[in-house]
Image (cartoon, helix red, strand yellow):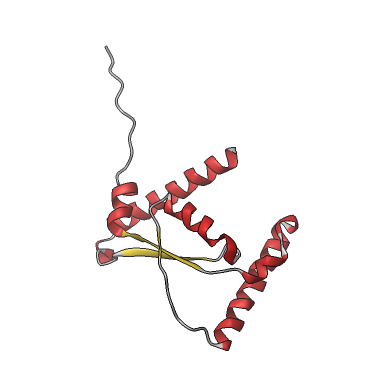
């Protein structure tokens, strides 16, 4: 599971960079939250994806709206595009249910981002006795 540890460290490092970037840009002081629209998994696995994102402080946003035929066709087209990328990169990972990917909307408040990832983490100083 070394890949999972690398994934977690990379995710945390990216959020730390984002927090520092926002802190360094006064013009972005009005940013209250960051939002992500995750399309990685079929609808049956969106709860698992939400739990994963929750480990980093993200919260799921429930959006209730009707989808027009045009919007449904657009989403299906996005799913075909994502599937083609998966096919090109790792054909063994492509499954038929990937054409029916769900969208999981998550957000992370600016305050939580800064609290968890904004401070530059330093190692405790070693006592040189």
- Taking depth in this image into account, of 9 and 57 the one nearest to the observer is 57
Q: Which residue is drawn at 25% across and 67% down?
A: 30
Q: Can residue 24 be seen in this view?
A: no
Q: Nearer the viewer, residue 47 or 116?
A: 47
Q: Quadrant of residue 78?
A: bottom right
Residue 128 shows in the view: yes
Q: Which residue lies furthest to the right in this view?
A: 92
Q: Where is residue 81 in the image (x, y as percent from the top left)?
A: 65, 72
Q: Where is residue 54 in the image (x, y as percent from the top left)?
A: 42, 53
Q: Is residue 48 above or below residue 9?
A: below
In the image, taking residue 42 as reference, residue 125 lies left or right, namely: left
Q: Is residue 25 left or right of residue 93?
A: left
- For the point 40% across and 67% down, which residue is it? 61
Q: Looking at the figure, which quarter contains the N terminus?
A: top right
**Image-quadrant location for residue 39:** bottom right
- Residue 90 image offset from top left, x and y in percent: 71, 56
* Quadrant (top left/top right/bottom left/bottom right) for the C terminus: top left
């Amino acid at each position: 599971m070394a890949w999972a540890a690398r994934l977690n460290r990379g995710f945390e490092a990216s959020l730390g960079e984002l927090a520092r970037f926002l802190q360094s840009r006064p013009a972005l002081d009005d940013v209250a939250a960051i939002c992500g629209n995750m399309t990685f998994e079929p609808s049956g696995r969106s709860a698992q994806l939400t739990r994963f994102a929750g480990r980093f402080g993200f919260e799921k946003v429930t959006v209730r709206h009707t989808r027009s035929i045009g919007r449904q066709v657009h989403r299906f087209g996005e799913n075909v595009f994502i599937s083609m990328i998966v096919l090109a990169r790792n054909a063994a990972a492509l499954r038929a249910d990937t054409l029916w990917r769900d969208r999981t909307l998550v957000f992370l408040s600016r305050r939580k981002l800064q609290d968890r990832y904004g401070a530059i983490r330093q190692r405790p100083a070693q006592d040189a006795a």
